[in-house]
Image (cartoon, helix red, strand yellow):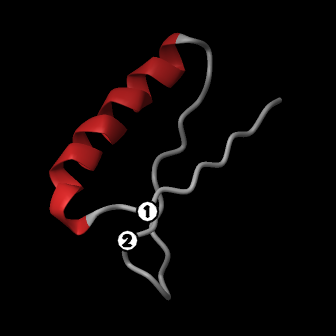
Amino acid sequence: MVTCYLRYVIDPAKVNEFEHYAKLWIPLVGKFGGQHHGYFLPSEGANNIA
């Protein structure tokens, strides 16, 4: 098993663009045999990290 952990710093002016990008990845990961577990925001600290 391979686990990829990506840290995104989201520009508040480009939230819609990030949402579009994020939604595109979910089916692509599944198409190539992976399992996408979603995007998670921290409960404490910065609110622009995913």
Question: Outermost residue, right direction?
Answer: 1
| Residue at disc 2, secondary structure | loop
Q: Earlier in the sequence, mark 1 or mark 2?
A: 1
Is residue 3 toward the left or the right of residue 50 in the image?
right
* Residue 38 versus residue 34 in the image, above or below: below
Labels 1 and 2 touching (C-beta < 8 A): yes
Q: In x, y percent, where is residue 42?
A: 49, 75
Identify the disc placed on residue 48.
Answer: 2
Q: Residue at x 47, y 82 (%)?
A: 43
Q: In x, y percent, where is residue 4?
A: 69, 40
| Mark 1 lies on residue | 9
Amino acid type assigned to the residue bearing label 1 in the image: Val
Q: Nearer the viewer, residue 28 or 48?
A: 48
Q: Residue at x 45, y 52 (%)?
A: 39
Q: In x, y percent, where is residue 3?
A: 74, 39
Q: Residue at x 83, y 29 (%)?
A: 1
Distance between the Cα atoms at labels 1 and 2? 6 Å
Question: Within 10 Å of the Cα at label 1, are there few (<14), some (14-19), or many (20+) other Cα atoms?
Answer: few
Q: In x, y percent, where is residue 14?
A: 20, 55
* Residue 50 versus residue 18 in the image, above or below: below
| Residue at disc 1, secondary structure | loop
